[in-house]
Image: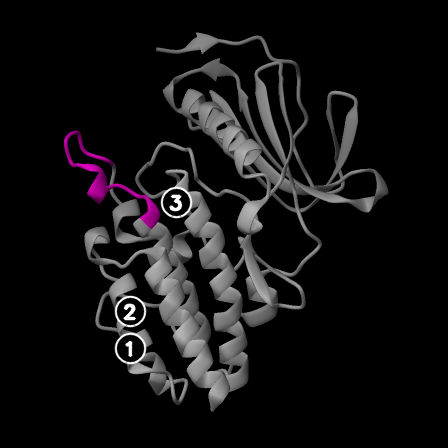
Amino acid sequence: MTMQLHTTAEPRWAAGAEVRLGPHPFLLRAPVDERTAADRSWVWREATAEVSGGRRVRLRQVALRRLGRRGAQLRDGLGVQADLLSIVAGDRGLPRLVGRHDEAGRTTLVTELPAAPSWRDGFGPGGRSAPLDRLTAAATLAAAGTLCAALAELHRHGQAHRALGPDTVLLLDRYRRAVPRDLGLAGFTPTAGEGPGIYRAPEQYRAAEPGSGSSRLPGPATDVYQTAALIYHTLTGRRPGPAPNPPVRAAVAGFPAGSEGVIAAALAAAPALRPGIAALSDALGAARAALAAG
């Protein structure tokens, strides 16, 4: 069932365009993501923007042209994220909420965005002709520890990011701390094929089946998989595939076997076989210490 909504005319989002939310202007920066539903009932948009003083924010918006099931899910998902961000208030590196705007069939979430490089900018992966040296690998693992802490806080509130990758993770403090750019798909109803394809977990490829149980749905175990995939790809230069994958120590000499085993378990096809995010963090920390010690 759908219901027609009365929305005002709206221009397409594009780099260099100005978007107004209430009295506030936002200058959009590339890249801009704009997707329209097949039946044109909703439009999803997200982009980086600048406000007065050059401060950067992240905008995520759904514009409903007709109220249908999926459009309502997107609107409600942004609402869940707004509520969650109000509670966590930037804890453990999670984004801070700037505001939520609801007007003329559009719901827009505005969050703070540090002026920081992405994981891809700092560590790759991709484009390398040689594996990482030990000290760079150790720095990578140290940064990953703060990403795990942010995800653990998200999991503590019953949510999962589910859209982690080299472009959705930022590096703060001269690459020392990794944090999620936004809340990803937290609060959104799982759908088949959700999230960026680069590290999509096996459970994200299929639609939820009635009675299938929560253990088969995307959730915290999805974040564990995606984090392990990001680390494995960064350290080895290879995207992980179905197990078994070549060991990390084949690319990074001295990588400890115990940490290797935890990463392999984190990449298991079945979510129930993966360790928790805290166990993965501990394993990455042990590997960092071993590599730094030489």
Looking at the image, tell me whether mark 1 or mark 3 is earlier in sequence order. 3
**From what the image shows, is residue 266 above or below residue 68?**
below
Measured in 3D between alpha carbons, the distance from the residue under mark 1 to the one under mark 3, in whole angstroms, is: 25 Å
Q: Give the number of the disc on residue 155.
A: 3
Q: Quadrant of residue 59?
A: top right
Instruction: Provide the residue designation for mark 1.
Output: 258
**Secondary structure category for the residue under label 2:** helix
Measured in 3D between alpha carbons, the distance from the residue under mark 2 to the one under mark 3, in whole angstroms, is: 19 Å
The quarter of the picture where the N terminus appears is top left
Q: Nearer the viewer, residue 237 or 271?
A: 271
Residue 140 visible in the snapshot: yes
Q: Would you say the residues marked 2 and 1 are in contact, meaning their CB atoms lie under 8 Å apart?
A: yes
In the image, the segment drawn in magenta is: 208-220
32 sits to left or right of 292: right
Q: Nearer the viewer, residue 81 or 185?
A: 81
Q: Residues within 10 Å of mark 1 (few under 14, many from 20)?
A: few
Q: Position of residue 145 (x, y in %)?
A: 48, 64
Please name the amino acid that badge 3 sits on: His
Looking at the image, tell me whether mark 2 or mark 3 is earlier in sequence order. 3
Q: Position of residue 12 (x, y in %)?
A: 65, 31
197 sits to left or right of 243: right
Q: Would you say the residues marked 2 and 3 are in contact, meaning their CB atoms lie under 8 Å apart?
A: no
Q: Residue at x 35, y 63 (%)?
A: 280
Instruction: Provide the residue designation for mark 2.
Output: 262
Q: Residue at x 33, y 62 (%)?
A: 279
Please name the amino acid that badge 2 sits on: Val
